[in-house]
Structure formats: C-alpha cells, structure tokens
Image: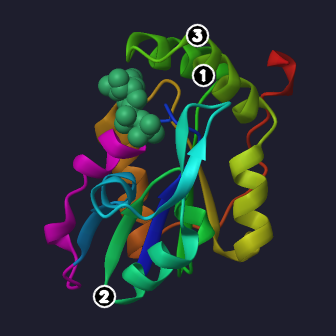
C-alpha cells in the first residue's frame, strides 16, 4: 500500500510523518521524504528561475517510486504519483506564512505559498488526479505534530472516511 502525504509547503508534512507510530501496523512501511530523494538523485529537469527552485522530473520520480513497496511518501508533489490513499494536510494561510517566515524562507515565497493554500491548489490537484474517494483532508492549524500524526495513522488504518472540500480559507484572500 502506498499512502502519500501532500500539502502546501509549511503545512507540516515532514514533521507529522516523523511522528508516525508505524509499529502498530502489520505492513512494514518505508517512510520516503520525496524532496530529499529528488535533490539527492538529481531527479530534476531544470531550474525555475522565477521561483529560484528546481523543477522535478516527475517521470523519473514515478519510476523510482514504483521500485519501492509499501510506503508513506511525503512531499508537496506526492499527489502527482499513484497512491492508494492521499492525505492532504491543510493549514490557515496566515499560519503557513508565519511558519515559513520562521523557517527562514523569503517573504515572497511565504506569501506565495499562503495564497496557494487559500486557493486550495494542492487539494484541487489531489482530487483531480485521484478522485474524492481517495482523498483525506486533515486540518493542522491548531494541532500538535503528534495529533496530526494520529490522524494520518487513522487514514492508514482505514478508520477514516475520505474527505475533501471540508476546509475553506477563501476569507484570507
Ligand atoms: P512541510 O514539510 O509541509 O513543508 P514542515 O514539517 O517542514 O512542513 O513544517 C514547517 C514548519 O512548521 C517547521 O518549522 C515546523 O517546525 C513547523 N510545524 C510543523 N508542524 C507544526 C504544527 N503541527 N504546529 C506548529 N508548527 C508546526
């Protein structure tokens, strides 16, 4: 089984996945931090000069992922790949901007990601690629990483119903 954890940068994917207790499952899941894999293996097609970031080679990443078995795959690109379940972490745009500024990102990048979150960009792509029946939206704003991890564990265990479109941050625009 492949569970992908996606969401706008700053929603807390890396942190939440690090708090998962995977020993409770019979399946031996590998945790994959996909952005690290893309960087380390140079799965890139070039550079986006406007955003000062690398452009991922999605075909190369997909092929690499297919060589792996049961996995929890975390990245803001994770919804671009095949998955049995798609977790979309959500966070208010204000809090995303605060977290990204605190993490030392440029003000422009923090603002751009906050606006993207307000527009449901990642959720929209996740539903488009996988259908609502595979998507699980999780609100993280006032939750600890442990609480978010527990929600993801419930998705992995099959204890949660799919949910998409339950979060609305349009008022922040
Ligand atoms: P992502 O992987 O989605 O970009 P990170 O896990 O790197 O997000 O978290 C972004 C920032 O927000 C980090 O500085 C992290 O410490 C902080 N953070 C992550 N999860 C939470 C949370 N549940 N509550 C408050 N701060 C958080």
Q: Residues within 10 Å of mark 2 (few under 14, many from 20)?
A: few
* Residue density around tag 3, few if under 14, some if 14–19, many if 20 or more, within 10 Å: few
Q: Is mark 1 within 8 Å of ligand 1?
A: no
Q: Which residue is mark 3?
A: 107
In the image, which is nearer the foreground, mark 3 or mark 2?
A: 3
Nearer the observer, 53 or 116: 53
Assess whether residue 23 is covered by the magenta stretch. yes
Tell me, yes or no, whether the highlighted magenta stretch contains residue 86: no
Residue drawn at x 64%, y 29% is: 113
Q: Quadrant of the N terminus?
A: bottom left
Which is nearer the eye, 45 or 21? Answer: 45
User: Which callout, 3 or 2, points at the residue further toward the start of the chain?
Assistant: 2
Horizontally, is 35 left or right of 24 in the view?
A: right
In this picture, residue 80 sits left or right of residue 106? right
Distance CA(mark 2)–CA(mark 1): 34 Å
Q: Secondary structure at mark 1?
A: helix
Residue placed most toward the observer, 6 or 107: 107
Task: Provide the residue span drawn in magenta.
Answer: 13-28
Q: Say which of 158 and 19 sits in front.
A: 19
2 vs 1, front mark? 1
The residues tagged by marks 3 and 1 sit, at their Cα atoms, a distance apart of: 6 Å
**Cα distance between the residues tagged 3 and 2:** 38 Å
Q: Could you tell me if the residues under marks 3 and 1 are in contact, i.e. CB atoms within 8 Å?
A: yes
Name above or below for residue 15 compared with residue 160. Answer: above
Residue to which mark 2 is pinned: 69
Task: State which tag comes first along the sequence, 2 or 1.
Answer: 2
Quarter of the figure that contains the C terminus: top right
Q: Secondary structure at mark 3?
A: helix
Q: Please give the label number shown on residue 109.
A: 1
* Image quadrant where residue 112 sits: top right
Q: Is residue 139 above or below residue 134?
A: above
User: Can residue 12 be seen from the camera position used here?
Assistant: no
């Amino acid at each position: 089984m492949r569970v992908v954890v996606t969401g706008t940068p700053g929603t807390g994917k890396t942190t939440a996945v690090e708090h998962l207790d995977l020993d409770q499952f019979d399946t031996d899941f590998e945790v994959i931090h996909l952005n690290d894999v893309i960087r380390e293996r140079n799965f890139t097609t070039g550079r986006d000069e406007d955003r000062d970031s690398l452009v991922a080679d999605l075909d190369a990443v997909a092929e690499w992922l297919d060589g792996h078995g049961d996995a929890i795959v975390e990245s803001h690109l994770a919804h671009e790949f095949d998955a049995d379940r798609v977790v979309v972490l959500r966070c208010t745009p204000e809090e995303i901007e605060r977290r990204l500024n605190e993490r030392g990102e440029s003000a422009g990048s923090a603002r751009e990601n906050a606006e993207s979150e307000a527009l449901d960009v990642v959720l929209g792509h996740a539903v488009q690629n996988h259908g609502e029946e595979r998507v699980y939206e999780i609100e993280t704003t006032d939750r600890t990483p442990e609480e978010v991890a527990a929600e993801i564990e419930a998705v992995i265990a099959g204890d949660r119903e799919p949910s998409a479109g339950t979060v609305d941050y349009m008022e922040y625009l």
